[in-house]
Amino acid sequence: MTSWLRLRNVTFKNRIIFIFLISSLTPFICLGFISFYTIDSIIGNKVESALQSNLKQDLMTLENALNNLNHVSQQLAYGGSTNKLFEQLAEARKPYDRLRLTNEIKTELNVISFSNPNVGLMLYYRPKQNSYEFENFRVRGEFAPKKLPVLAQFSEITYYGPYKSYNGSINQYVFSIMRKVNLPDQDVYLYIETGRTAIQSLFAPQNRKDSPRRLLLLDNEGRIAFSEVPDAFAEQSVFPVTDADEQSGYHGDYFWNREFSNQGWSIVSVMPEKELNRERNRWLIQIIGIFVAFLIVAFFFSWLLWKMVYRPLDKFHREIKSLIHSNAQEHTEVTHIPEFDYLLYQTRTMKGKIWALYEEIEAKEKRRADLEVEKLLYQINPHFLMNTLDTVHWLALMNGQKEIDKLVLSLNKLLHYNLGKMGETSNVGDEIQALKEYLQLQQIRYDFQFDVDLDVDEQALAIACPRFLLQPLVENALYHGVSDDGYIYVGVRLKDEEVQITIQDNGAGMGQEMIDRLLYEDGKEKDKVGMGIGMRYVMRILKATYGETAALRIRSEIGKGTVVSLRLPIVGRELNG
């Protein structure tokens, strides 16, 4: 049976640990399963959203650069001081005037160029003569606008790019516009390129070595004007889409995104599918790493719960189990958690008090048993004695011996009460009745006369008290002091939730030495006469019944009598035996 209980206890502990772990890990496990089931769509959407967002930023950068070129070209092409200078230059004939006007036009262009850092090379182009003039930077090589990639073309303005700049001081990709200048009787076009920093991050693979993303530019008819991956998307070819408004999709081994500009052209971002999958795998590894971190945190909190909750509870369980074993080993370990350590201390203190109380009760019961054994020593076969007295009673009655009959009947009643069932309690009324029988026998026995005054409160008659309590006290009064014309007063009062008993005589009294001998004598009751068991018996039965709550006091002076006071707490109107 014990082995089975121990096994069951271990199983219960394992269940508690398992419940702790499952309750802690369940949210993370569920999160893991949900993540694995939705990982593809989540990561795919995130990567595609990131590509689309980057493409929108590129489109915004390019549109801002072209809008800036368009704004500058409008200022120079329509009206203003520059056009007036051109008209004056066309009419001037003197070399000095022509040189002055030429310098003024260049100054105007330089002012605009320096005041707008996003503008690069500027010049005026005459297509019929295939010549240019008033350039603000040195032109590299042969200027041939017809060979430039057209991005978008309208009646008076054309957008080009990207291509290597004609500016001899830089070597990077630029965009440009060419707008017809509003001059009467002159066929002149204004050519403007983007500046050095306008589109520095666009269409320059050396600036994006760490990114697999590449760009395409489509003109307003859907043809590829510029391609960073010519092997898959050749320039001047039509971009391979089934729907002209489609913004993303797959072509060959590439995934592409597309954004449209206000001028009709569009920009396309392409990425190899393997690079896209690599990006997805990178996100997948990050999510798995986060999940593993969650598991580690969950195990840590489970361990923390086990240490801070389960282990202290297990200590309490062992402390409670040890309460029923008096010889159990004293536990001294602590949890290092102030609240739990305080409760453990209180539990161990309670255990000590419980077992101290148990030992006190056990000692009290042992004293009670000793008293009952001691009482048996005076019974001397009570049944035989009472049966014999009963026979004497009937013989006296048959022979007309009324005095003998009265004596024997009182003696029989007194013996029946005093030698009653061991451990059986009585009440104040029964004690008074037994005392009356005892006094009647003593008046016949002694050769001197004495008076007894019984003053008993009727409300106290039903109060429970130990059996054979008053007779030893009255017997001491008779034995130690009362002689001819003696007087004994027995008073019983109910006051302040206790019974107050007073036994007073007018005998010879006694000194303190005699009082001490009566109170503390031990083992001498057998030497006393009559039925007296002794003051020591009374004190022991009081302590066994009431503990320290009852009190016995003796006041006496030689020649002035003796007063014995007894106070009993009320523990019930009647005590069941």
Image (spheres, rainbow, N blue to C red):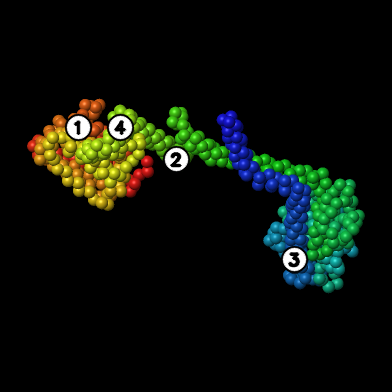
Q: Nearer the viewer, residue 354 or 165?
A: 354
Alpha carbons under labels 1 and 2: distance apart:
49 Å
**Secondary structure type for disc 3:** helix
Q: Residues within 10 Å of mark 2 (few under 14, many from 20)?
A: few
**Are circles 4 and 2 on residues that touch, CB within 8 Å?**
no
The residue wearing badge 2 is: 343
- Answer with mark 4 or mark 2, whichever residue precedes in sequence: 2
Mark-to-mark CA distance, 1 and 3: 131 Å
Q: Secondary structure at mark 4?
A: helix
Residue at the image point whose x is 25% and y is 44% from the top: 432
Q: Which residue is mark 3?
A: 71
* Badge 1: residue crowd in 10 Å (few <14, some 14–19, many ≥20): some
- Camera-nearest residue between 2 and 101: 2
What is the CA distance from the residue labelled 2 to the residue labelled 3? 83 Å
Counting from the top left corner in percent of width and height, residue 53 is at 74, 55
| Rendered view: 477 above or below 523 | below
Q: Which residue is mark 1?
A: 518
Label 3 crowding class (10 Å Cα cut-off): few <14, some 14-19, many 20+?
Answer: few
- Mark 1: secondary structure: helix
Q: Is residue 465 visible?
A: yes
Q: Quadrant of residue 217?
A: bottom right
- Type of amino acid at the residue the image marks with label 2: Leu
Residue 233 coordinates in the image, percent (x, y): 88, 51
